[in-house]
Amino acid sequence: MSDLETSLVLMLKSGGMYVTREQIAADLGVSAHDLDGAIEDLRARGYRIDEVPGHGLRLVDVPAVLDDCELETALSTSIIGREIFTFGRVTSTNDVAFSLARSGSPEGTLVIAEEQTRGKGRLGREWHSPPGLGLWFSIILRPKIAAYESATVSLAVALAVAGVLRDVYGVDARIKWPNDVLVGRKKICGILTEAEFRGGSVEFVIVGAGINVLHEAADFPEELRPIATSIAMESGAEVDRVAVISRVLGEVEDKYDRLCRKGFGDIRREILPLSSLIGKMTRVESGKGVTEGVAVDIDETGALVLRKDSGLNEKAVAGDATLI
Ligand code: BTN
């Protein structure tokens, strides 16, 4: 998307009224020829631009697919999304973001795809990522934190997503440690964090999030239907994917900024009341084995604290948690 196309979309969006070609060319300081080209390109991308002789142009509709211009003009963030890579189809946005991060892409780079052919879930699982229904995206972050604190980044992102679902869409979203967002027992958003470390510090973190937005129950494979849900299913409202991502990224930027400036303590206080595990008997399975106990806290490094039958606390730093 050229700068001219972006400016043109912003201009047409801002007024909502008809504007003549002459007026647009003068305001944007471009030739009539360049403007014709930009209008043609935007129409080819799915922007519906109406023209009435004597009145001018008006933006009637924007593309139904995720479009980088749509994203750029919708985002109000300053760091997250300052570089955006959009794909129609990609193996995994996390894999693309990881390569970009290795070759020096800056903090805040966003990789987003309409469809993933090998979407990755946690613990080697597959993430169902069909076209047109969800938001599948990854963000490159470069927090100055120790390796053992990296779990705090995905918890901050889970809080951002849960906050938007609750406040904007009226969905009773909860955070399931270490980084899922659930409604009841059904997953509405999964987060996969992959990091590269140097010494004991984080070099970069790729936070990949999959948000189920427009799915109806039949859109999920049968085996996922009992355990997956979407914003549309939970809110019963018409939902616009660009509006969702713009709000989510705004919240992610806010939480991440607080995490970097003040540490995890502040964010942790907001996570605890939204946790689906705190106060409940929980089992955590990890490479180190199985731990069971009542989840009583999430500590300052993002670890889940379980109170065992013996009365002693044990911390889980990673793993798969289930209620028992
Ligand atoms: C999970 O719940 O197991 C985590 C799911 C994470 C899915 C997202 S979709 C965007 C990004 N790219 C991937 O391949 N995975 C994450």
Image (spheres, rainbow, N blue to C red):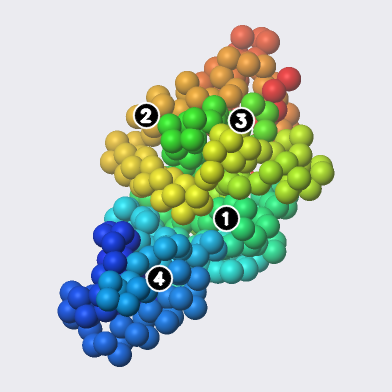
Q: CA distance from mark 2 to mark 4?
A: 51 Å
Q: Nearer the viewer, mark 2 or mark 4?
A: 4
How far across and down, in percent of the image, does residue 83 sit?
38, 66
Q: Which residue is mark 2?
A: 265
Which is in the foreground here, disc 1 or disc 2?
1
Query: Which kind of residue does numbered mark 2 sit on?
Result: Gly
Looking at marks 2 and 3 on the same chain, the residue that comes earlier in the sequence is marked by 3
- Residue 183's tag is 3
Gap in angstroms between the C-alphas marked 1 and 3: 19 Å
Q: Label 3: state its secondary structure.
A: strand
Q: Give the residue type at disc 1.
A: Trp
Asked if residue 96 is positioned above or below residue 254 in the image, the reply reads below
45 left or right of 58 in image:
right
Q: What residue lies at 40% left-to-right and 70% top-to-bottom?
A: 50
Which one is closest to the eye, mark 1 or mark 4?
4
Q: Nearer the viewer, residue 99 or 301?
A: 99
Query: What type is the residue that disc 3 sits on?
Result: Val
Tell me the quarter of the image containing the N terminus: bottom left
What amino acid does circle 4 point to? Asp
Viewed as shown, does residue 15 lie left or right of 124?
Answer: left
Residue 67: x, y in percent? 48, 66
